[in-house]
Amino acid sequence: MATQQDIKRRIRFARNVEKITKAMELVAASRLRRAQARIEALRPYADRMQALTVEVAAATSRAHDQPLLARREVSTIAVIALTADRGLAGGFNANVVRRSIEVATRERGEGHEVVWLTVGRRGTSTLRFRGQDIEASYTGMTDRPAYSDAQAIAERVADIYTELRVDRVVLVYNRFVSALAQKLDVVDLLPVPESLLDGEAPETIAGSYLEEPDGSTILSHLLPTYLEVTIYRALLESTASEHGARMTAMRNASENAGELIDSYTLQMNRARQSEITQQILEVVAGADALE
């Protein structure tokens, strides 16, 4: 049975852990507010960029000639696993890695080769530990990603696609829903989804826009920007999701530490009571012996 000193040591340790987890919860909450403001500010722009790309692609007869819209028989697929640089966020990183491996396993089962690209140290280290060869990794920027980070990733993705090294690119990441909820998404990045090619040009195109030099040239500049914005949006969604997941995980850890402290305190009180009772019995036994 543990002594009072042992229990006191455990209580001190649990209280120290509780202080750390509460501090980490407050830091995550502060970062979450900033990250949430960034993603909420970007979403209207990203949605409008997608709508504009849809409109120009639908109005351009040569849209199918664009390299980023080219569709071909799939033999190699690139999987981008978007995780965080740090842990202590519950299942945030593990869920992305698990889903990414599921996607890769399914594609390999269909006879396709898989090329890995990773964002975040956690996903990179886990996939390497599992013996996966990583084409490119991007780390050190998931806490506060910049647009230049999305540009670098988009450029690499576009290069391996236009060079015919891969025939499809899939992005796996956590989409921010709320501070308490994140949704795991699997998004086709390249070729650009068929929705950009389907349908007829909206009436606003003919009456509101003058294309100069021509729609095909505009689309050739618009598609890389669309790819960059899509990746940047995923980076910001993932960052907000990470801070929300960490805040929740640290809150649960603090509550668990509090429960542990209560349990240890009860054990210590019982041990103290048992010790006092034993001392009283010894005094009574000694007094009886003197009579």
Image (cartoon, rainbow, N blue to C red):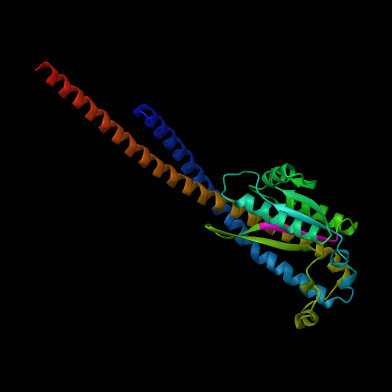
Q: Position of residue 12 (x, y in %)?
A: 41, 32
Is 202 located above or below residue 83 in the figure?
below
In this view of the protein, can residue 213 be seen by the observer? Answer: no
Which image quarter holds the N terminus? Answer: top left
Provide the major secondary structure of the magenta segment. Answer: strand
Q: Is residue 2 magenta?
A: no
Residue 236 image point, x, y percent: 65, 55
In the displayed structure image, the side of residue 74 where residue 279 appears, left or right: left
The boundaries of the magenta stretch are: 167-173
Q: Is residue 14 above or below residue 206?
A: above
Number of labels in the image equals: 0
Q: Is residue 259 above or below residue 179?
A: above
Foreground: 158 or 287? 287
The picture places residue 239, in percent across and down from the top left corner, at 62, 52
Look at 81% across and 76% down and name the residue there: 58
Q: In which quadrant of the rendered view does residue 229 lie?
A: bottom right
Residue positioned most to the top: 290
